[in-house]
């Protein structure tokens, strides 16, 4: 401890007296210079050391206080602008964090909506087995040309109002199915044209179980026992049971597209004059006119599910 009360920090250097300088006559200019630039002395250096010591101690105290404040902010979970900027930069430097392909939530709850015809047709849709709707029908608009050769059959697609199903998808499925070469136009014998006005040879109708039963009953058919579809031959309607269209049948399992193709081909087959058939031999493809919604076996012989009149 020095006489001034300041602690001397660090090892002390031995001070030596400055070398004697030759005596120079004092002039006004040299006096002014001396006043402007006082010669360094032992006392001056010691005073400067104490000033630097005080400054160093003050800086150390300020640094310590800042460190405590910053530590408290980090403990409290407080983010600074610099931290936020760093986080943003990190996010930008990792493209995978901003990619919509990651498992981040999407507006529909994280499940991507199907986009292709095949994807939509592969899904089941919710519909109660005893669902009822308005009993009124709406024709699906638009026109699809007959793409094939031979006799042209014109049909209309009607959907019962109030059904929670996609009528346009149903119409697309009907047209693609009937004009597939494995269907009833096989070999150029006939082709199918969809119309929404004017003459139609028949109307393929998607309807609730209750409305389907009512229209099938007009032709003496009971569809209520197995909740099936029918060709109401006494009317112009080929009735497709919306419950079966939405939910399928255990006989086809998860093959929803194939089941719906079978449903269309089977009922239109009745409209063309074809009756029910049975399984010809074990392991064979079932005839499309077999009642595949109900079973795949007849007389102990089991067939494989098949949607086409003329499978490849």
Image: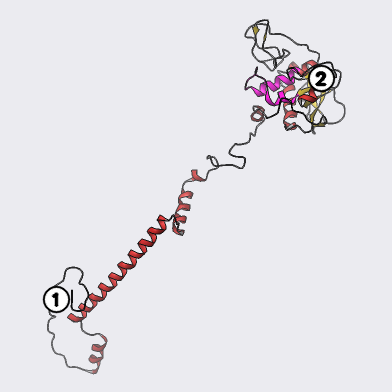
Say which of 78 and 308 sits in front.
Answer: 78
Q: In this view of the protein, can residue 298 be seen by the observer?
A: yes
Quadrant of the image occupied by residue 146 = top right
Residue at 53% from the left image edge and 39% from the top image edge: 103
Residue at 70% from the left image edge and 22% from the top image edge: 260
Residue at 63% from the left image edge and 36% from the top image edge: 113
What color scheme is it?
Answer: secondary structure
Say which of 111 and 71 sits in front.
Answer: 71
Inspect the magenta stretch and tell me whether residue 258 lies in it.
Answer: yes
Give how far apart the Cα atoms at labels 1 and 2 are: 121 Å
Is 44 on the left or on the right of 231, as rendered?
left
Region of the chain picked out in magenta, as a range: 241-266
Where is residue 163? Give x, y as percent.
75, 31
Quarter of the image where the N terminus is located? bottom left
Where is residue 17? Give x, y as percent.
12, 80
Using the image, determine if residue 96 lies above or below residue 32: above
Residue at 85% from the left image edge and 31% from the top image edge: 197
Judging by the rendered image, the residue that carries numbered circle 2 is 216
Quarter of the image where the C terminus is located? top right
Say which of 221 and 240 sits in front.
Answer: 221
Is 68 on the left or on the right of 108, as rendered?
left
Q: Could you tell which of marks 1 and 2 lies nearer the N-terminus?
A: 1
Label 2 secondary element: helix
Inspect the magenta stretch and tell me whether residue 247 lies in it.
Answer: yes
């Amino acid at each position: 401890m020095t006489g001034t009360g300041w602690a001397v920090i660090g090892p002390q250097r031995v001070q030596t007296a400055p070398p004697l300088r030759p005596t120079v006559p004092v002039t006004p200019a040299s006096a002014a210079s001396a006043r402007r630039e006082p010669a360094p002395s032992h006392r001056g250096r010691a005073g400067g050391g104490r000033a630097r010591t005080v400054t160093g101690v003050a800086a150390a105290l300020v640094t310590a206080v800042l460190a405590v404040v910053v530590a408290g902010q980090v403990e409290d979970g407080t983010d600074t602008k610099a931290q936020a900027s760093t986080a943003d930069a990190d996010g930008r430097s990792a493209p995978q964090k901003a990619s919509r392909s990651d498992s981040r939530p999407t507006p529909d709850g994280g499940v991507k909506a199907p986009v292709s015809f095949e994807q939509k047709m592969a899904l089941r849709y919710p519909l109660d087995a005893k669902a009822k709707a308005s009993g009124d029908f709406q024709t699906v608009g638009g026109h699809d040309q007959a793409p094939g050769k031979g006799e042209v059959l014109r049909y209309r697609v009607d959907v019962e109002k109030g059904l929670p199903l996609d009528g346009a998808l149903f119409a697309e499925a009907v047209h693609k199915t009937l004009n597939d070469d494995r269907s009833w136009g096989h070999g150029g014998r006939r082709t199918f044209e969809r119309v929404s006005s004017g003459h139609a040879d028949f109307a393929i109708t998607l309807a609730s179980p209750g409305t389907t039963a009512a229209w099938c009953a007009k032709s003496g058919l009971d569809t209520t026992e197995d909740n099936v579809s029918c060709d109401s031959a006494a009317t112009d309607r080929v009735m497709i049971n919306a419950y079966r269209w939405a939910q399928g049948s255990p006989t086809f399992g998860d093959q929803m597209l194939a089941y719906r193709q079978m449903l269309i081909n089977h009922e239109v087959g009745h409209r063309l004059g074809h009756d029910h058939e049975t399984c010809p031999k074990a392991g064979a493809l079932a005839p499309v006119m077999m009642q595949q919604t109900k079973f795949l076996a007849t007389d102990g012989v089991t067939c494989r599910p098949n949607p086409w009149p003329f499978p490849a």
